[in-house]
Amino acid sequence: MSTITVIGGTGYAGGHIVAEAGRRGHRVVVASRSAKAPATGAPHGVEYLPLDVLDATQLAAAISRSDVVVSALSPRAGLDGALGAVNRQIADLVSRHGARLLVVGGFSSLRREADGPRVIDEGFGPGDVVPDAEVAALISEATQMNAILHDLISRDDELDWTFVSPGMEFGSHVPGERTGAYRLGTDGLVLVDENGRSAIGGADFAAAVLDVIDSDRAHRGHLAVAY
């Protein structure tokens, strides 16, 4: 079994990935600023490592122990405006260590068709309503996540990376139930169901991520996960 370090392992996506990796018997390191074992004790094979990702020494120490690193960070709070640089440093450390990197990205980095723009780049038409502050914040987050994908694509080393985008409906506000089913797109295109809906629950998204890790596939590519 691999040692999988989930940076941001106490967040929504990261927490589900930690649970799925532990369930499969991997050794899991939950690395985040708020990482703390539950009062009942850490599950077998799961370690909680307090980590300040802005501390280069702490970050290097966490990654040096890993076969696979999952970056499940988001550009919020102290990482707003800094996430790109942090993920670039994570990528550099993973490459130097010879491990594999999976980045949990966003829906807006996908394309609706092969030759089309990414969702984040579709922009607003002349008659569109100017987004309010909340929507503007979401656009800022999506832009920062998309920049991480561009950084990975433009790397000239041999870093083994995978960028995984969930469906549009994904997060703690739409958690869903584990179904044991999902679809995996390997061409960076939006996946929709027969009703035109793009969605994935947290547990099923985590199962897709672990299936990618366990099957040792989809290297240096952009994946989409949805029902």
Image (spheres, rainbow, N blue to C red):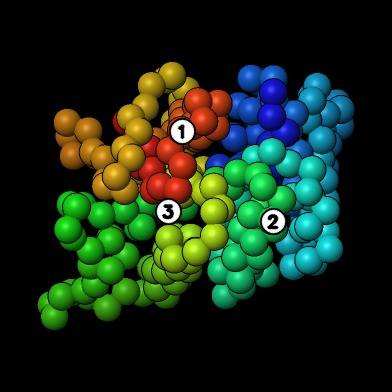
Percent position of residue 73, x then y = 60, 55
Amino acid type at image mark 3: Gly
Q: Residue at horizontal 15%, vertical 75%?
A: 125
* Numbered marks: total: 3
State if disc 2 and disc 1 touch (CB < 8 Å).
no
Q: Residues within 10 Å of mark 1 (few under 14, many from 20)?
A: few
Element carrying mark 2 = helix
Which of the pair 213/130 is nearer the observer? Answer: 213
Q: Which mark is residue 217?
A: 1
Residue 151 placement, left or right of 76: left
- Alpha-carbon distance for marks 1 and 3? 20 Å
Residue 204 vs residue 28: left or right?
Answer: left
Name the residue carrying label 2. Answer: 96
Say which mark, if any, is on residue 106.
Answer: 3
Q: Earlier in the sequence, mark 3 or mark 2?
A: 2
Q: Position of residue 56 (x, y in %)?
A: 78, 66
Residue at (71, 50) in percent of width and height: 97
Camera sees residue 163: yes
